[in-house]
Amino acid sequence: MMASNKNGTLYLGVTSDLAQRAWQHRNGLGDGFSKQYRCYRLVWFECHDDLQEARQRELQMKKWKREWKINLIEDANPDWRDLFDEIAS
């Protein structure tokens, strides 16, 4: 999940290359939602071995209430740190 800032706008998506996709978001590439709402901070992610499984999880989470997504982030990343440097190295 990408966020504009703590408790800000959230963007949820699936990718096969998290580091590359997070870099694209951070640098405002593309003309979509994350650029419009400045969702440049990687605040939460989970890994799946199967792309179909990841897509199913994405669809499930997109139906979640915002509060549930915030709780998920804060359980793993209470300070809403940008996790990009942890995955990019």
Image (cartoon, rainbow, N blue to C red):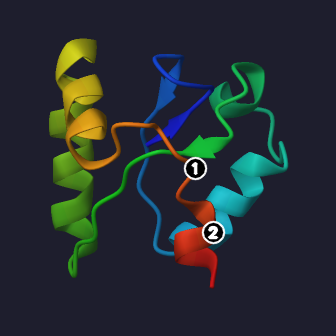
The residue located at (34%, 37%) in the rendering is 78
Q: Nearer the viewer, residue 62 or 4?
A: 4
Q: Amino acid at mark 1?
A: Asp
Q: Inspect this view and state whether residue 8 appears.
A: yes
**Mark 1, residues whose alpha carbon is within 10 Å: few (<14), some, or many (≥20)?**
some
Quarter of the figure with the C terminus: bottom right
Q: Nearer the viewer, residue 58 or 7?
A: 7
Which quarter of the picture shows residue 66?
Answer: top left
Mark 2 packing: few (<14 Cα in 10 Å), some, or many (20+)? few
In the figure, 79 relative to 63: above or below?
below
Residue 81 percent coordinates (x, y) = 52, 46
As helix, strand or loop, the secondary structure at mark 2 comes to helix
Q: Residue at x 72, y 61 (%)?
A: 23
**Which residue, given by chain and number where applicable, does mark 1 sit on?**
82
Kindly report the distance in space between the C-alpha atoms of the residues bearing marks 1 and 2: 7 Å
Image quarter hosting the N terminus: top left
User: Mark 2 and mark 1 in contact (Cβ < 8 Å)?
Assistant: yes
The x and y percentages for residue 4 are 63, 26
Residue 65 shows in the view: no
Indicate which disc residue 35 carries.
none
**Mark 2 is on which residue type?**
Asp
Q: Which residue is mark 2?
A: 85
Give the residue at x 75% y 56%.
24
| Frontmost residue, 40 versus 36 | 40
Could you say where residue 41 lies in the image, as x and y percent from the top left?
A: 62, 42
SS at badge 1: loop
Quadrant assignment, res 61: top left
> Residue 12: horizontal and vertical position, in percent?
42, 38
